[in-house]
Image (cartoon, rainbow, N blue to C red):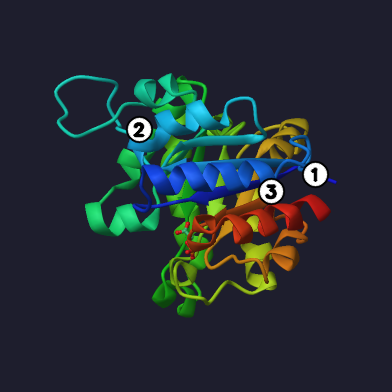
Amino acid sequence: MSKKFIIGNLKMNGSIAFYNELFTNLKEQLRSIDPNNVDIGLCLPYPYLFLAKNSLSNTNIKWGSQNVAKDKRGAFTGEVSAEMILEFESKYVIIGHSERNTAYCESDQNIAEKFLRVKENGMCPVLCVGETLIEREAGMEKKVVRSQLETLIEKHGTNIFENSIIAYEPIWAIGSDMAASPDQAQNMCAFIKEFIGGNLGSKTGQKTLKKLIKVIYGGSVNDKNALQLLSLEDVDGALIGRCSLDAKKFSDICHSAHRN
Ligand code: PGA
């Protein structure tokens, strides 16, 4: 059984009272999960990282942010650096989520810079890739995802993906109650592993990297469809939006991962 990664994306939701309650409930409900089998992470709005550090240290729940600045430090009003995020003992940083790409025009070049900042600080990037509905209907999903990954490979080389997570999130499945079918999720996660593995020279290197690349699925994952999606061969976990706001649903998904 390979280790699964269940990452919550809390988006711009919650309050101090909400997170205090969520953390208390999750600590209780996830207590029996073995961290060797399931890695659990909560990607929070920046102001609540401090709360997470205080409340979740020494538990099996890790935390992190939903974005990071592409620059290291300096005159960048409103930005938050990777170094700052690390100060709160964060483990995960989501990068390139489609909601940021559409609302804030994030380019693949920016995303590549951000990815590097996260790696330089020893945290784990959760890189989101995926196609729109129009692109899927035109049969372009692999072309789109390949080009999103290529910018990173061109800038930093294939090994940058080691100890990183790639989240395949078809944009049409996010917030839509229309999750990808098991076939679609499996095909795309396998494709991502093959593409990255195939960019490595030696056969042994390919094998090792394919093992080290973690590809998770995101987009309308819930407590009902999680078990099936998480049992797919090349799906190493899930990125959870709406259901991460509900302790019971999120913990049910984590328990489904534990059963795989
Ligand atoms: P959803 O969001 O689970 O609410 O579809 C997923 C995401 O945006 O990461």
- Please tell me whether mark 2 sits on a helix, a strand or a loop: helix
Question: In the drawing, what numbered circle is on residue 113?
Answer: 2
Q: What residue appears at the point 69 percent right and 72 percent down from the top-left corner?
A: 183
The residue that disc 1 covers is: 2
Q: Are marks 1 and 3 in contact (CB under 8 Å)?
A: no
Q: Mark 1 against mark 3, which lies toward the viewer? A: 3
Q: Amino acid at mark 2?
A: Glu
Pick the residue in front: 25 or 252. Answer: 25
Reply above or below: 121 against 111. Answer: above
Q: Amino acid at mark 1?
A: Ser
Question: In the drawing, what numbered circle is on residue 29?
Answer: 3
Q: What residue appears at the point 28 percent right and 48 percent down from the top-left corner?
A: 106
Tell me if residue 260 can be seen: no
Q: What residue appears at the point 42 percent right and 19 percent down from the top-left corner?
A: 87
Residue 85 coordinates in the image, percent (x, y): 39, 27
Mark 2: few, some, or many residues within 10 Å (few <14, many ≥20)?
some
Position of 240 with respect to 229 (left or right) is: left
- Please tell me whether mark 3 sits on a helix, a strand or a loop: helix
